[in-house]
Image: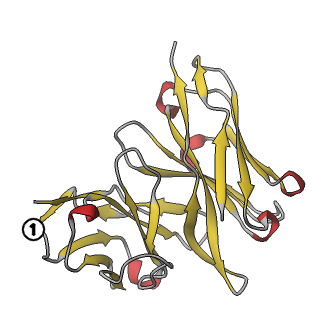
Amino acid sequence: EVQLVESGGGLVKPGGSLRLSCAASGFTLNTYSMNWVRQAPGKGLEWVSSISSSSSYIYSADSLKGRFTISRDNTKNSLFLQMNSLRVEDTAVYYCAREGIAVAANLHCFDYWGQGTLVTVSS
Amino acid sequence: SYELTQSTSVSVSPGQTASITCSGDKLGKKYASWYQQKPGQSPVLVIYQDTKRPSGIPERFSGSNSGNTATLTISGTQAMDEADYYCQAWDGTTRYVFGSGTKVTVL
């Protein structure tokens, strides 16, 4: 069974930093690109960042202005999101999501999601 | 930047058909995916590559994509289908985009 379990969320002051983790199990992590998607309270889904299976390609939303960095450790079946210079508007549930593939081709969709971890940025 | 537009809400009677649209420039030339999200839960993929259903998704969910509009259709809508639905596409270069979401109410 595919499982994605996020951790590391919490309350942080504006300007602070936080590192989120996502533990993957039930599949071979090094075969899949992975993503972070966030959802502010009462709002819609917003794609945050993507990392290819071997970390060769990393993409992030323009709105983040380089404050967030995605990384992964396939040997530890883990995905990370380092968040710096946090702002009140970064308050959201952060989801780890797997990109679907078929016959080694990226389907450009998210076929499994974690339960999310809440990040609250407030003074 | 690429944008996807969805209507805010759709109401449907049980057993009837609900259609949810998603508009974007030349969206028909990209693959559209759809997600269902119920309150307090994580999103669930219901349609990918415009028309395909993941394993375990009921046949009443179907999709299409042409021109500038992708459509998610729920045939024989059930009370359990009441949820928020989001479309999503890859902009063709480096970014993923979500629509703003449509709330489906089963009256």
Q: What x and y, as percent, mark residue B84?
A: 31, 56
**Quadrant (top left, top right, bottom left, bottom right) of the N terminus of chain A:** bottom right
Q: Residues within 10 Å of mark 1 (few under 14, many from 20)?
A: some
Q: Identify the secondary structure beneath mark 1.
A: loop
Q: Which residue is mark 1?
A: B13
Please name the residue shown 48% across and 61% down the image.
B97
Q: Quadrant of residue B66?
A: bottom left
Q: Is any atom of residue B1 visible in this view?
A: no
Q: Is residue A38 left or right of residue B65?
A: right
Q: Is residue A96 above or below residue B16?
A: above
Please name the residue shown 61% across and 41% down the image.
A65
Please name the residue shown 64% across and 63% down the image.
A98
Q: Chain of mark 1?
A: B
Q: Is residue B8 left or right of residue B40?
A: left
Please name the residue shown 73% across and 49% down the image.
A23
Q: Farthest residue in the right direction? A: A75
Q: Is residue A119 left or right of residue B33?
A: right
Q: Farthest residue in the front direction? A: A1
Q: What x and y, as percent, mark residue A89?
A: 47, 31
Q: What x and y, as percent, mark residue A76?
A: 86, 51
Q: How many marks can you see? A: 1
Amino acid at circle 1 = Ser
Q: Is residue A105 above or below residue B37?
A: below
Q: What x and y, as percent, mark residue A31?
A: 78, 71
